[in-house]
Amino acid sequence: MTTAVVTVRGEAELVSAPDLATISATVHRTGPDADRVRRELAEASALIRAIVAERRSSLERHSTSGLHVGPVFSGRGGQRISGYRGRLSTELVVADFAALADLIAAVSALDGAQVDGPWWSLRPANAIYRQVRIAAIEEAKRRAADYAAAFDATLGELVEVSDLDGSIGAPRMMKAFAMDSARGGGEPELDLEPAEQRVGAQVTVRFQLADD
């Protein structure tokens, strides 16, 4: 006689405060020749490194995320090079949120600087990922037990448990603001309230059914 099997899906969603805030700082430069643009970007890079060095204990990590230097074309048909423009982007991942506003103010005060972010996120090792998996499995077990009871049976041996594809994760939150140092006016008010992270999990579980 074939043993009956019940297959159910378990789902769970948990909420957590973020661990990290990521900002992108981009410095723009223009000049009559490529060497000057590169030299000014190098100087800006040194200033950013100094800002980072002063706040290293507040950072999870930082890296250069983009560099571009290229000609500006003008004239009939856009064939004449009239100058050069460049940009240097740095990604800063902040762990100490109390230092975030100060870091943004320092970087955005640089000449020609643009700051985007923050994007809130969780560390991959955050305990919430394990917690949400367990919660999804417990939900699946409860559902399976309900099905078994409806057939006057009980749950027997576990046959299989598997994550559904792409079932676990926390979406990266949209950026809260963008600031350009070229804008006039006084210091802007920044809304830097950390955005809660929602983490979901789905699992498929199969149990054998046993006679009650």
Image (cartoon, rainbow, N blue to C red):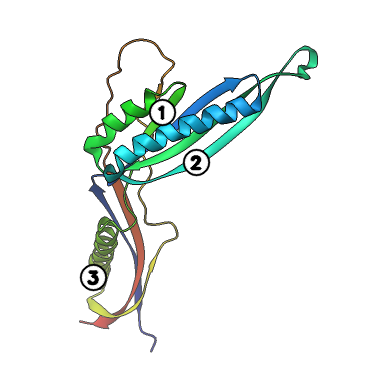
* Residue under numbered circle 1: 115
**Pointer 2 local density, CA inside 10 Å: few below 14, some 14–19, many at least 20:** few
Query: Horizontal and vertical percent for residue 50?
Result: 37, 36
> Dividing the picture into quarters, in which one does residue 121 lie?
top left
**Disc 3 and disc 2: Cα gap in Å?**
51 Å
Residue receiving disc 3 = 145
Q: Quadrant of the N terminus?
A: bottom left
Label 3 vs 1, first from the N-terminus: 1
Mark whose residue sits in front, 3 or 1: 1
Q: Residue at x 47, y 21 (%)?
A: 112
- Report whether 172 appears left or right of 27: left
Mark 1 is on which residue type? Val
> Is residue 169 among what the camera can see?
yes
Q: Position of residue 12 (x, y in %)?
A: 28, 55
The residue that label 2 is drawn on is 65
> Can you tell which quarter of the image residue 95 is in?
top left
Quick check: can you spot residue 23?
no
Residue at x 35%, y 63% (from the top left corner): 203
